[in-house]
Image (tube, grey):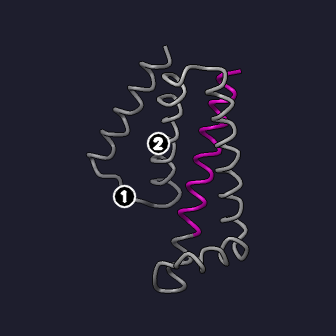
Amino acid sequence: MKWILLALVILTTVLGDLLQSREMKLAAEHRGNIPGAGSVVKLIFARRYLFLAIASMGISFFAFLALVQTEPISFAVPASAGSFVVETILAKLLLKEHLSRRKTLGTLAVFGGILLVAH
């Protein structure tokens, strides 16, 4: 069960973060600046992917609560950092973000740490 919960945490965190980033960047392009808090509330209801991002983050939160209820936090927190690795790869592929050598090495270091904790 822990691996199912962990996968759910990672997948919903990644989905939420990527959709949030995409939608907020699109909103900034259309407005020419970063929207304030009032504008963000309007955006949530106007942009369905932003609403989906928030729903994904909620699922991630509750899945993480279930994970720490059944597993030690010394496993749950480092293992859930797998979302950083997946997000970095998908940010490069889907959002066309630049990955410097330093970011790539850092991502590999996080991945190595996850492997150490998982065993």
Depth check, front residue: 47 or 74: 74
Q: Which mark is residue 98?
A: 1
- The x, y position of residue 11, in whole percent, is 63, 41
The quarter of the rendered structure image containing the N terminus is: top right
Depth check, front residue: 62 or 3: 62
Q: Which mark is residue 84?
A: 2
**What's the amino acid at mark 1?**
His
Tell me if residue 39 is in the magenta stretch. Answer: no
Count of marks, rendered view: 2
Mark 2 to mark 1: distance in Å? Answer: 15 Å
Is 5 placed left or right of 24 in the picture? Answer: right
Q: Up-down: is 107 above or below 75?
A: below
Q: For the point 56% across and 54% down, which residue is it?
A: 17
Label 2 vs 1, first from the N-terminus: 2
Q: Up-down: is 10 above or below 4?
A: below
Q: Secondary structure at mark 2?
A: helix
- The x, y position of residue 4, in whole percent, is 69, 27
Chain part drawn in magenta: 1-23
Depth check, mark 2 against mark 1: the one in front is 2
Is 77 placed left or right of 8 in the picture? Answer: left
Tell me if residue 4 is in the magenta stretch. Answer: yes
Q: For the point 49% across and 13% down, which residue is it?
A: 119
Outermost residue on the top side: it is 119
**What's the amino acid at mark 2?**
Phe
Q: Secondary structure at mark 1?
A: loop
Depth check, front residue: 25 or 77: 77
